């Protein structure tokens, strides 16, 4: 079997020629522009007496944060239930009762996860819509 050295050489040469172009492209666009700071919007808000940054908390933002945290924790709980059901299914060892119980656990967990994700999507939409 003959190794095609010319093809390998051409491929390596092409990679070595194109690599600096892609690397330098990432460096050129690495700068960020913060509109609030660079346009003077933060300074105007401070002079006008508005609180900017993390200290500006309203009832709406706190409510949205609490709802997001609770729904996020519920998602983790459902993930644990799915893992428990899958583990139970793996160690069922062909026992039909254990397999049915594990299947029921996984299906109920998936249903709960779907309901939780739907509630999360709906609440996120409503929070951003009314803000």
Image (tube, rainbow, N blue to C red):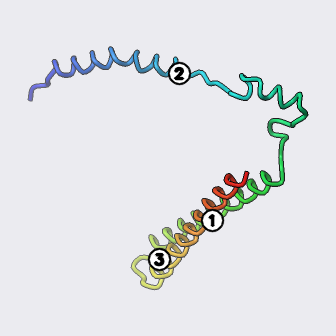
Front residue of 13/83: it is 13
In terms of image quadrants, where is residue 48?
top right
129 lies left or right of 29: right
User: Within 10 angstroms of label 1, few (less than 14), some, or many (20 or more) residues?
Assistant: some
44 lies left or right of 72: right
Q: Which residue is at a point 21% across and 21% down the rendered structure image?
A: 8
- Which residue is disc 3 drawn over? 103
- As displayed, is residue 126 above or below residue 32? below
Q: Which residue is at a point 46% across and 72% down the rendered structure image?
A: 91
Front residue of 79/117: it is 117
> Going from the N terminus, do you reach mark 2 or mark 3 first?
2
Q: CA distance from mark 1 to mark 2?
A: 38 Å
In terms of image quadrants, where is residue 127?
bottom right
Q: Which residue is at a point 41% across and 21% down the rendered structure image?
A: 22
- Which residue is disc 1 drawn over? 119
Q: Position of residue 11 (x, y in %)?
A: 24, 21
Front residue of 16/21: it is 21
- Which residue is disc 2 drawn over? 29
- Work out whether residue 35 can be spotted: yes
Quadrant where the N terminus lies? Answer: top left
């Amino acid at each position: 079997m003959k190794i095609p050295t010319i093809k390998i050489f051409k491929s390596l040469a092409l990679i070595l020629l194109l690599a600096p172009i892609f690397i330098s492209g990432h460096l050129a666009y690495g700068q960020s522009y913060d509109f609030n700071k660079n346009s003077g919007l933060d300074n105007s808000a401070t002079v006008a007496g508005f609180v900017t940054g993390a200290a500006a908390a309203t009832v709406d933002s706190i409510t949205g944060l609490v709802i997001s945290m609770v729904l996020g924790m519920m998602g983790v709980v459902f993930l644990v239930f799915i893992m428990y059901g899958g583990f139970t299914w793996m160690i069922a060892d062909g026992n039909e009762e254990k397999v049915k119980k594990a299947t029921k656990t996984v299906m109920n967990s998936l249903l709960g996860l779907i309901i939780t994700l739907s509630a999360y999507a709906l609440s996120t939409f409503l929070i951003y819509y009314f803000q």
